[in-house]
Amino acid sequence: MKNQRQPSTVVFYAESAFSHLAPLWAAVSERGLWAASYGIAEEEFRAQILDRGRAVPVYAPEKVRNALWQMEEFLAGNRKRFDLKVDWRGMTPFQIAVRKAVMAVPYGQTASYGEIAAAVGRPQAPRAVGGVQSTNPISFVIPCHRIIGSNGSLHGYGGFGGLQTKAWLLELETKNK
């Protein structure tokens, strides 16, 4: 029985033509937010959904309306905290620990990769933290843009627009603290 495949999870997804940054995508399962991204085509977002694990993507705007609305509010500077559960399936314990530590960084503040590594009990692993964040499947809700280099410089941002978007997000939060 150990080798039995896990059943597929139905994941509902849809997009929002958000104008402050780029079109947004969100996907939710019965347990919570499965994926969130922006500035990509539907095919790429569906691939991200499938990268998380065995899933059956179903286009259903009504099922993801709340997640997209909260992301829109965040990008407009009108939301500082998300009221969304995260579906952690398909992530390793280390990935979950890192992403939860990143979620604990308050709006308008930053932490270094080393600080996150120390927070998860792996102070010698800031590069591993960076690796986890480079594959963050849930943009904005897991705010990887708040994680910076130990010298205060911006490092790696895998989202659409790269470091320019990371800087924009940090500026947005600074202006709306």
Image (spheres, rainbow, N blue to C red):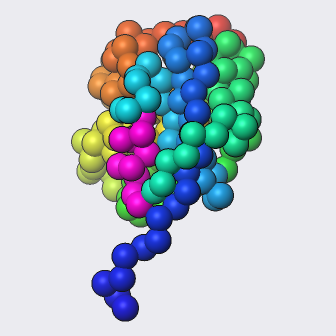
Q: Is residue 43 magenta?
A: no
Q: Nearer the viewer, residue 87 or 121?
A: 87
Position above or below: 132 against 89 = above
- Specify start and end residues of the magenta stretch as a single range: 45-54
Q: Position of residue 96 (x, y in %)?
A: 46, 56
Query: Can residue 83 be seen by looking at this rendering?
Result: yes
Q: Quadrant of the C terminus?
A: top right
Pick whichever, 72 or 177, lies toward us: 72
Q: Magenta span: helix, strand or loop, mainly?
A: helix
Left or right of 172 in this view: 81? right
Q: How many marks on residues? A: 0
The image shows residue 36, relative to residue 23, as above or below, that is below
Residue shown at 34% from the left, 17% from the top: 162
- Tell me what residue is drawn at x 48 percent, y 24 percent: 38
The answer, for residue 140, to whether it is visible in the render is no
The image shows residue 121 at horizontal and vertical percentages of: 40, 58
- Closer-to-camera residue (149/92): 92
Residue visible at 52% across and 61% down?
9
Q: Is 52 a magenta residue? A: yes
Q: Position of residue 99 (x, y in %)?
A: 47, 47
Q: Is residue 61 left or right of residue 148?
A: right
Q: In this orientation, which residue lies closer to the viewer: 71 or 152?
A: 71
Residue located farthest toward the bottom when viewing the structure as drawn? 1
Q: Residue at x 47, y 65 (%)?
A: 8
Residue 3 location (% of width, % of height): 31, 84
Looking at the rendering, in which quadrant would you find the N terminus?
bottom left
